[in-house]
Image: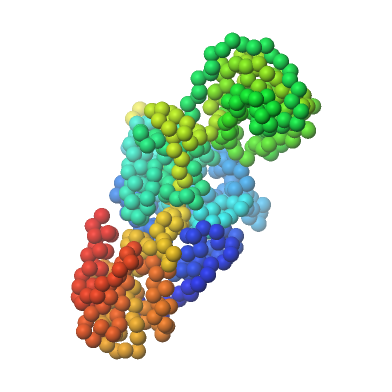
Amino acid sequence: MKLSRLHLKTLREAPNEAELVSHKLMIRANLIKKEAAGIYTFMPFGWRTIRKIEEIVRQEQDRIGCQELHMPHVNPSELWKESGRWYAYGPELWRIKDRNGRDFCLVPTCEELCTNIVRQEISSYRELPLQLYHIQFKYRDEARPRYGLMRSREFIMKDAYSFDRTPEDLEAAYRLQYDAYVRTFTRCGLDFRTVEADNGPIGGSNSHEFSALSNVGESEIAYCEKCDMAATIERAECVDDKPVDEPEQPLKDVYTPGTKTIKDVCDYLGVDEKKTIKALMFTTFDKDLNPADYVCVFIRGDRDVNMIKLVNALGIPEHYIEFADEDDMGPITGIVGGFTGPVGIHNCKIVVDSELVGTKNMVAGANKEDHHMTGVCYGRDFTGDIVTDIKTLKEGDPCPHCGAPIKHTRGIEVGQIFKLGTKYSESMNATYKDENGEDQIYWMGCYGVGVTRTMQAVVEQSHDDKGIIWPVSVAPYHVIVTVINPKDETQMELANKIEAELETKRVEVIVDDRDERVGVKFNDADLLGIPIRITVGKLAKDGKVEYKLRREEDNEVMSAADAIAAAAKLVDDEIFGM
C-alpha cells in the first residue's frame, strides 16, 4: 500500500482541549477526529487498529463457544422499565422519542434486550448453557465528555451474556470469560491488573474489572503486595480499627467557637482526628426525582465516606442522592451546619460507619452553633438505622485479607465482567423448562470490553516523546518502508520488492513514497508508531537498507533479504505465534 495514495494528515501540535498524552497523540497521528463533545470519527489508520482489537476480542470469544450476533442500537423503553433500569440508570441513559412520542433509548448495555431474545428463543434446558456476544457502538450521555475516548458519548463495546441453569454453571461461564479477557488484553499488549469491582447500575453480585495501569486512569485501585488482594476503591473492604477500651466519660457540651471543620475542632480541643465523629448530610430522591428522605452519615473524623458503599447501603442508584441544603434540613431534623452530631437528631435516616461501633468518649457536633459534645459513646448516646462499612480504604490501611499495608495505584478500565445472578431473569420473567417440565429462571452473567478505550489505553502505556509505539498485534500496519527519494527508480524498485515479499508472509506493509522531506517522513513514522521501519536510500544500489524497531533507538544496516526475514519473524512471533 502506497502512502501517497492514502489519506493521512498528521499534526505537529495537538488542540489545546486535548489533556492526556494519548488523546494528543491520537489526534496528531490522525487516528481520530472530533465531531462534537465526546463524539469522534475514526480515521483510516485509527479504524485499522480498532478492527484489529475487535478481531482479537472476536477470536477469544469464539474460542470459548460464545456466539456472535448483532443487536439494535435503539431499545424500546418497555424492556428497560421491566428491569427497573429506565429509572435507576440516571441521566447518562440517552433517552429519545420517535415521532409518535414513544420512548426509546440509545443503549449503553444490552442486558434487557438479550434477556428478551433468550426468553423468546430458548424454551428447554437442552439448549443451555448459552453465551451470546456482539461488538457495536454504545451510547452514554456523559455530563462532561473528556479525555478523548476515555469518557466519550459514543464508544465501541464488546458485550457478552451467559445463560445458565445453576450458580455453579454461571461460575464456570464466568471463569471462561475471565480467562478469555486475560488472553485478550495480553494480546493487545497491555500491562493490566484484574481487580474486584463494584457492580454499579448493571447490578448483580460479583464483578471483576480489568484495569490498564496508568497514573492518569480514572480507576483508583487498592492492592496488597503480600497477597493477591486487589480491588477498586469503590469495592475495597476496610478492616475496622478496634475501639479503645476505656471508661465512659459523661456527655459534655463544650463551647468551640468557629470550629466548623474536623481540623478546627481538633486544634481547638487538642484531640486526635480519630477521636472525632464527622457528619455528612444528604437528600435522597424517589424514581421521579422528588425529595424522599434526609440522611445523616457519621464516620470517624480521619476517614472519608465512600459514596458507592453509601448508596449500596441505602439501596439506591447514585443519582438518587445529593448533599443536603443544611438550612432546609435543620428545622426538620435538628442538625446545625458545621456542628452536626449524632446525639438528638430526628426525622432522618442515620447511617453509621461500622468503625464507630464500640467507640467511647468521642467528640461530635452538638447540633448547636459553636458547640461540640465530648464523651460521646456509641450505644449509650447514639446508634444507627444502618451500620455498615461506608469508608474508603486508604493507602497504608491493613489489607482485609492478610493485614499487610495497602498500596494504591491507578488504572484505565478496559473491561469488566459481572455475575448478574437472577436480577434480569426474575424481573423480566425469563424462564426455561427443566427436565420435569417446570419453569426455571436463568442464572446470568455479562461481560464487557471497551474496544475504543483499549486503543487509547495502549497509546497511553506505549509512547515516547516522538509518538506512539504500537504493539505489533494492534498496529495499523506492521512495517513502514520509508523511501528517501521516490524519484530514484532503484529505491522504488527495492521498496516494491520488499513490500511484495512481506505481503506474501502475512505482513502488512505501507510504503512512504510521498514527495516529502526525509525528516517529515521519519517524524510521521515515529508519530504513527508503526513497529518496524525499513528505510530504502542510497544503499539500495547494493541491495541494502536500514532496519529499525520503533521500540528501540538503534537501527541496523542489512541486506533487504535479511530485513524481510527479520520483519516476518517478528510479526510471526508476536501475532501468529501467540
**Badge count:** 0
- 308 vs 216: above or below: above
x and y, in percent, of residue 304 in the image: 58, 33
Quarter residue 559 falls in: bottom left
Quadrant occupied by the C terminus: bottom left
Left or right of 72? Residue 383 is right
Q: Residue at x 53, y 18 (%)?
A: 243
Quarter residue 405 falls in: top left
- Whether residue 473 is visible: yes
- 485 vs 535: above or below: below
Q: Residue at x 54, y 53 (%)?
A: 151
Left or right of 107? Residue 206 is left
Left or right of 470? Residue 220 is right
Quadrant occupied by the N terminus: bottom left
Q: Nearer the viewer, residue 291 or 232?
A: 232
Q: Residue at x 58, y 18 (%)?
A: 359
x and y, in percent, of residue 178 in the image: 35, 42
Q: Residue at x 45, y 29 (%)?
A: 398
x and y, in percent, of residue 493 in the image: 27, 85
- Whether residue 125 is visible: no
x and y, in percent, of residue 14 in the image: 53, 67
- 63 vs 348: above or below: below
Way the structure is coloured: rainbow
